[in-house]
Amino acid sequence: MAAPSRKSILVVDDDQSFLAMMVDRLEAEGFRVTSAEDAAQAVIQAEAFSPAMVIMDVNMPSFGTGIDALAKLREIPKLKDVPVILMTGMSPEGLREVWRGTPHQVWIMYKPPKWDILLSQIRRVLGPTEKPPAA
């Protein structure tokens, strides 16, 4: 059996403190992480970084929403099947008003996320990772 690798994740959120927390926690779990603060940056970063997964806020105030970014990602051949976790603080009804997309490789999680559930979903989709050695 091959050793687990450091899989790459793009995290996108306009809340800088939430973004920093996510990056820190995912890196501590052995993932390679890059981040973006808006939908436009998300698409640019995803094209350049080719992440194994994207974790993205739905409601971002500038340059489009996470839903807009997801639509753009699905237009890029190498990213059309990248797994995406959409994070939102919206109610399920509010989310249904802004997103009627297909659930292909897309999961919804509500903020604030329960870390163990989020991590379990990431590992279920991406497989195990190699944790970095303790400092």
Image (spheres, rainbow, N blue to C red):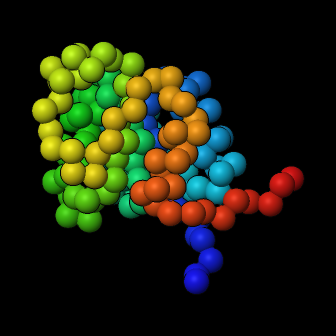
- State which quarter of the image contains the N terminus: bottom right
Q: Say left or right for 20 vs 92.
A: right
Q: Which residue is drawn at 15% across and 44% down?
A: 102
The answer, for residue 68, to whether it is visible in the render is: yes
> Furthest-bottom residue in view?
1
Where does residue 13 sit, x and y in percent of width and height? 44, 31
Q: Residue at x 23, y 34 (%)?
A: 67
Q: Residue at x 57, y 56 (%)?
A: 32
Q: State the residue in front, 36 or 32.
A: 32
In the image, residue 61 above or below residue 76: above
Q: Say left or right for 83 vs 99.
A: right
Where does residue 74 sit, x and y in percent of width and height? 19, 52
In the image, residue 56 above or below residue 16: below
Q: Residue at x 83, y 55 (%)?
A: 134
Q: Say left or right for 31 vs 65.
A: right
The answer to which image quadrant residue 16 occupies is top right
Count of numbered circles in the view:
0
The answer, for residue 9, to whether it is visible in the render is: no
In the image, residue 62 above or below residue 129: above
Where does residue 93 sit, x and y in percent of width and height? 21, 17
Where does residue 109 sit, x and y in percent of width and height? 39, 32
